[in-house]
Amino acid sequence: MSATGVRVQSPGAAGEYTWGVFRQVHETDRAFLLSFSPNAWSPVLVLPKRAVTGQADVAALRALLHRMVGGSSTAGRSSRRTPWSLGR
């Protein structure tokens, strides 16, 4: 992550997203979800919390995401069934 956006990399794929493409940030017990549309069924970019160490880093990431993207926090509402929580 940087001031301009998010860079993702996995085996066989890489991408860069500017902050402007994200419409909302949601939080679950395990991850931050950056949505490309306010529609509940839109694609999301998943940022697992296990990628950062410690609660202070999670809090700093939460603050950064909300500052750059905005949106809602759904932490602690894991009983709500959303497209990304199905199968949990």
Image (cartoon, rainbow, N blue to C red):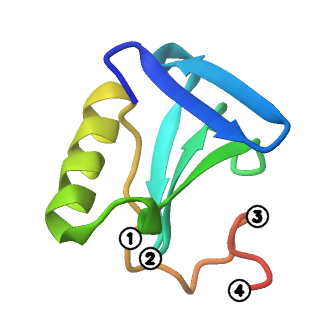
Secondary structure beneath disc 4?
A: loop
- Answer with mark 3 or mark 4, whichever residue precedes in sequence: 3
Q: Amino acid at mark 1?
A: Ala
Q: CA distance from mark 2 to mark 4?
A: 11 Å
Q: Which dot, 2 or 1, sits closer to the camera?
A: 2
Q: Amino acid at mark 4?
A: Arg
Label 4: few (<14), some (14–19) or many (≥20) C-alpha neighbours in 10 Å: few
Label 3: few (<14), some (14–19) or many (≥20) C-alpha neighbours in 10 Å: few
Label 2: few (<14), some (14–19) or many (≥20) C-alpha neighbours in 10 Å: few
Q: Judge whether 4 appears above or below 37 on screen.
A: above
Residue farthest front in this picture: 11
Residues at discs 2 and 3 in contact (Cβ within 8 Å):
no
Secondary structure beneath disc 1?
A: loop
Q: Which dot, 3 or 4, sits closer to the camera?
A: 4
- The x and y percentages for residue 18 are 52, 15
Query: Mark 1 — residue?
Result: 75
Query: Mark 4 — residue?
Result: 88
- Answer with mark 2 or mark 1, whichever residue precedes in sequence: 2
Rendered residue at 71%/65% (across/down): 84
Query: Mark 2 — residue?
Result: 29
Which label sits on residue 83? 3
Secondary structure beneath disc 3?
A: loop
- The x and y percentages for residue 10 are 72, 43
- Answer with mark 2 or mark 4, whichever residue precedes in sequence: 2
Rendered residue at 28%/66% (across/down): 53
